Amino acid sequence: MAGAAEQRQGWRYRANVGARVAAGTIGAYAVAALFAAALACVLPMPRAEATVPATLLAFLVGPAVTVWAFLARGPWRAWAGVIALGAVFAMITWLAGGGANLLGGLLGLWTTVSTLFTGPPAA
């Protein structure tokens, strides 16, 4: 048992967990945003009305991606799955004519991530 405890203190284990946490938070947020944009473009109703059910369903996609990030065999596979799923939703959004939604969603993601590191803007 002492070997397992010693193994969890190495830098590889910490990098593995850190990569999975990043994939499960930032990656899940990006995939959920892309899913909401894709679904809002594809649903057979006006986009203003389609955003509500698309966003509600995106709240289910985010935790599913987070679970995937920790169930994958390794951090590379976790990131590969997150990137592949995000690429599929981005392509659906783009092909459905929602290129502006895609760019707006990515800009919103960038704003959120940059706020995490710099803090909220001064009032």
Image (tube, helix red, strand yellow):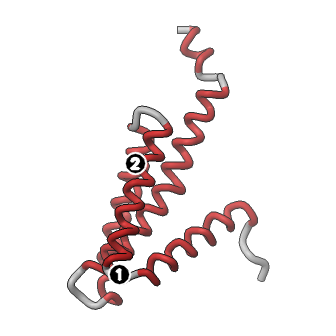
In the picture of the structure, the residue carrying the numbered disc 1 is 51
Q: Which mark is residue 112?
A: none
Q: Position of residue 122 (x, y in %)?
A: 78, 78
The amino acid sitting under disc 1 is: Thr
Q: Residue reaching furthest left?
A: 44
Vertical relation: 114 (above or below) 50: above
Q: Residues within 10 Å of mark 2 (few under 14, many from 20)?
A: some
Q: How many numbered callouts? A: 2
Residue at 51% x, 77% y: name it: 103
In the picture of the structure, the residue carrying the numbered disc 2 is 81
Q: Nearer the viewer, residue 5 or 87?
A: 87
Q: Position of residue 12 (x, y in %)?
A: 62, 27
What element does badge 1 sit on? helix
Q: Quadrant of residue 7?
A: top right
Q: Nearer the viewer, residue 91 or 16?
A: 91
Q: Position of residue 47 (x, y in %)?
A: 33, 87
Residue at 45% x, 76% y: name it: 102
Residue at 30% x, 83% y: name it: 50
Q: Residue reaching furthest right?
A: 122
| In-image side of 115 versus 123 (left or right) | left
Mark 2 vs mark 1, CA separation in Å: 25 Å
